Amino acid sequence: MWQITLRLGQNIIMLLKSLVVLAAAVTRVACHGGVLSYTIRGTTYPGFLAYNPPTGQKSIQREWDTYNPITDPLDPNIACNVDGSSLGSGQLSATVPAGSQIKATWNQWPHTVGPVMVYMAKCPGSCTSAIASSLSWFKIEEAGLLSGTLSTGSWAQGELVNNGNTWTTTIPASLAPGEYMIRHELLAIHTSNQPQFYPECAQLVLTGSGSAQPSGSYLVKFPGAYQKSDPGVTIDVYAQASTTNYTIPGPAVWRG
Ligand SMILES: *[C@@H]1O[C@H](CO)[C@@H](O)[C@H](O)[C@H]1NC(C)=O
Ligand SMILES: [Cu+2]
């Protein structure tokens, strides 16, 4: 009797979970977003299909479930989004030479205020079994306020939109070969004092003859790299209409 009641309870919970996912899919609005695919040396690698269960999906990208932002820099999911766990047997990696350009393509990204940041992290062994929050991340690219003032100037995210919702990054040519996670992050700051983080991760197997590795001062954890009190994180861009500098959060960029 207990057993049957328990089963029934579990089934009801599963049903409720499916309904929540369904409701999310139906009410999905194009007001947020994420990386949908990666193009490297002429090959396009489709990303994880958000709003769909991970079962049966095959992608170089880690799972991420919705277009919604992460709003707390200390959120445990800030490394590779919700739920950035491995797809198991569906988890793929792209094999690419160091020095390659990687173009990330977003959905119809609506925000034009805020920086674009790209990180990498060396996986201890295989990236497929790596826990994103335990990795040591280094920044390979950042772009923030490109010109003008905080409230009316041009931002990297505006450039991303102008480039057809894409951002192209070069993987440092001197980076030592091995398995790496790459993490694209948009930090949208169009809402006063309410940061929105949009990170997505993908797995790479890097080839090449480089031997460079970033030293400890370039390495950060997610969560940990950002604090709410960082000047570039909790910011009201409209309250500083004549300010022409913006401090991109996180560590210095490692250029190989
Ligand atoms: C602009 O620069 C000043 C001086 O370095 C700094 O205190 C301030 O936080 C910066 N503003 C922003 C929005 O990053
Ligand atoms: Cu949004």
Image (cartoon, helix red, strand yellow):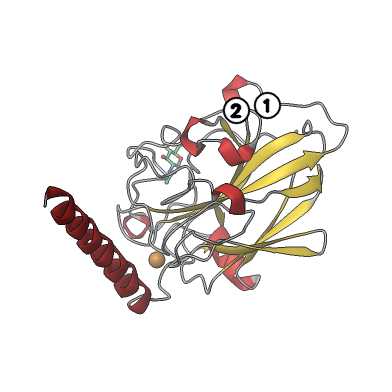
| Position in image of residue 226 (x %, y %) | 42, 37
In the picture as drawn, the residue positioned furthest to the bottom comes out as 26
Q: Is residue 137 visible?
A: yes
Residue 71 at what x, y percent from top left? 33, 51
Which residue is disc 1 drawn over? 214
State the residue position of label 2.
Answer: 218
Residue appearing at x 17%, y 50% in the figure: 3
Q: Residue at x 47, y 48 (%)?
A: 84
The image quadrant in which ligand 1 is located? top left
Q: Choose between 6 and 14: the one closer to the eye.
A: 6
Q: Is residue 225 left or right of residue 135?
A: left
Contact check, label 1 and label 2, Cβ < 8 Å: yes
Closest to the observer, 249 or 133: 133
Q: Residues within 10 Å of mark 2 (few under 14, many from 20)?
A: some
Tell whether 133 sits left or right of 8: right
Q: Residue furthest top?
A: 216
Mark 2 residue CB less than 8 A from any atom of ligand 1: no
Q: Is residue 173 left or right of residue 187?
A: right
